[in-house]
Image: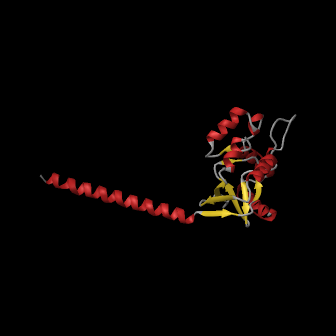
Amino acid sequence: MPHLRKRPRLWRDAIVAFALIFLLWLIAMKLQQRNEQVLAGAFVIVDGDTLSLAGERLRLRGLDAPELKQSCGNSERPWPCGQAARMRLVELVGANTTCRGAERDRYRRLLVSCRTGEQDPAALMVREGLAVSYGGYGLEEAQARLAGRGLWAGDFKRPADWRREHAAMEGDEGMFGWIRNLFSREEAQ
């Protein structure tokens, strides 16, 4: 009979443990909401996936756009895909754009999701083939790829690969390169 007495105690301990885990989850969700920043105003478009507002850099979540100096296509028919991505984002982000974010990337940029009216500018960038999916927008990338839009119309290097190659060529690898890039970006503002 002693083993029968242990069962109610075991159930009670399990319920208490579950309630504590649930309470900790609720606290974590509330803290995350409190840290979320909502931004609106005259955004400056830095490149195809980076915005600036009042001197703070914002990185669009879920996509990776070509770098400003990046060209796509082959050597016979190159096109400035980095410039095209930036120009399209300039068209998509307007006075009624609102961005929200709570997390920061390794470069301390606020990771944001934006809305311009009912539109998601990041989703449109990927759907139009001017950016690739980076943890989000997989369906939009598949649509662009199937339709042969933007980057998918020809040859291109994924932005991350292009950055890696050019960082190695310019000697911007490691901590010193990161610090040099940090200060050169701030000077450009």
- Classify residue 184 by image quadrant: bottom right
Instruction: State the scheme by which the image is colored.
Output: secondary structure
Residue at 80%, 50% in the rendered image: 87
Q: Position of residue 28 (x, y in %)?
A: 48, 62
Residue at 54%, 66% in the rendered image: 34
Residue at 69%, 47% in the rendered image: 64
* Left or right of residue 188, residue 65 in this image: left
Q: Position of residue 144 (x, y in %)?
A: 70, 37
Can you say which quadrant of the picture contains the C terminus? bottom right
* Left or right of residue 70, residue 99 in this image: left
Q: Is residue 69 positioned above or below 143 on the image?
A: below
Q: Residue furthest left?
A: 1
Q: Nearer the viewer, residue 142 or 9?
A: 142
Q: Position of residue 116 (x, y in %)?
A: 68, 54
Q: How many marks?
A: 0
- Classify residue 73 by image quadrant: top right
* Left or right of residue 18, residue 105 in this image: right
Q: Nearer the viewer, residue 90 or 110?
A: 90
Q: Nearer the viewer, residue 68 or 29?
A: 29
Residue at 75%, 63% in the rendered image: 42
Q: Nearer the viewer, residue 31 or 97?
A: 97
Q: Is residue 114 positioned above or below 66 on the image?
A: below
Q: Position of residue 157 (x, y in %)?
A: 75, 40
